[in-house]
Amino acid sequence: MKLQGNVALVTGSGRGIGKATSIKYAENGADLILADIDAELVEKTAIEIRKIGRKCVTVNLDVGDIESIDNMIDVANREMGGIDILFNNAGVTKHINFFDITSEDWDRINTVNAKGAFFCMQKIAKVMVDQGRGGRIINTASIAGKGYRRASNAAYAASKGSVIAMTYICAGYLAEYDINVNAVCPGVVKTDMMAGILSGRSSDVGVNTEELESTVTSEIPLGRVNEAEDIANLVVFLSGPESRNITGQSYNVDGGMIMH
Ligand SMILES: NC(=O)c1ccc[n+]([C@@H]2O[C@H](COP(=O)([O-])OP(=O)(O)OC[C@H]3O[C@@H](n4cnc5c(N)ncnc54)[C@H](O)[C@@H]3O)[C@@H](O)[C@H]2O)c1
């Protein structure tokens, strides 16, 4: 129960990596603020958390909207008495060819993934500074931000490159407050997001999804794609006492696809 006594806020906790991590947080003793744009999905996560016996509150969040972030923080302070850990995870993408990316695609992807991640981090860091007991921030980036050539699209790669860069800068700013800031960079993770990307790409290139999946897997040195839990394990480690002296890092969980 290494996270006992901590309140963790997870954005994008309705499904996928955010849901798996919320469950692992609860199994490790944390109470939770579950935030997602999909109110129905996040209630299902809350049922799992309560089964484990932890306290949790759900909040409807569009991470690309500043007022929505402010509202989430009000709920966190009012209902849970503050925030010790932020898992800054909500993100969007889809398969888009380089020449087909529109200004609208760019804006939505970067508003949610980069701007949203920054303002969650800035505003929640302020809560942590005011609490005066340190904190942990873990951002979800991607190997797309490190040059993975099969990234879903260039606007997404740019947004995740931003997350990696802001992780380094914010870690520097927040160290004096004992707030550690790190990023996880997943490779291929079996979630609904990945299913959507594979199906978009398969109809674009005229190959069926199974073939595409086996090509992608064959390019992974360790020969297996991630389960959401593979990412959650690292996030829990970066949120707990064993990682107290790790900050400003971006760790790949990708079976060896990108080796930097
Ligand atoms: N799946 C992968 O292979 C993979 C790889 C690298 C990085 N990632 C990153 O991991 C994170 C989680 O991905 P996932 O695969 O679990 O995705 P997912 O699509 O399965 O889940 C994302 C969750 O975020 C929520 N969400 C979407 N837009 C939101 C918004 N504007 N505000 C609040 N919540 C919002 C969704 O409702 C959903 O519950 C994302 O940042 C994604 O970019 C995923």
Image: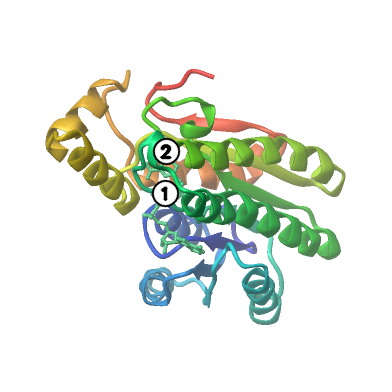
Instruction: Find out if the beta carbon at label 1 lies less than 8 Å from the nearest ligand 1 atom.
Output: yes
Residue 158 position in % (x across, y down): 55, 37
Q: Is residue 148 above or below residue 68?
A: above
Query: On the image, numbered disc 2 is attached to which residue?
Result: 153
Is residue 134 found left or right of 105 in the rendered image? right
Query: On the image, numbered disc 1 is attached to which residue?
Result: 93
First in residue order: circle 2 vs circle 1 = 1
What type is the residue that disc 2 sits on? Asn
Is residue 256 found left or right of 218 in the rendered image? right
* Label 1: few (<14), some (14–19) or many (≥20) C-alpha neighbours in 10 Å: many
The C terminus is located in which quarter?
top right
Report the residue at 13% width, 37% height from top: 210
Q: Is residue 3 above or below residue 226?
A: below
What type is the residue that disc 1 sits on? Thr
Observer able to see residue 152? no
Report the residue at 52% width, 68% height from top: 35
SS at mark 2?
A: loop
**Camera-nearest residue between 45 and 218:** 218
Marks 2 and 1 in Cβ contact (< 8 Å): yes
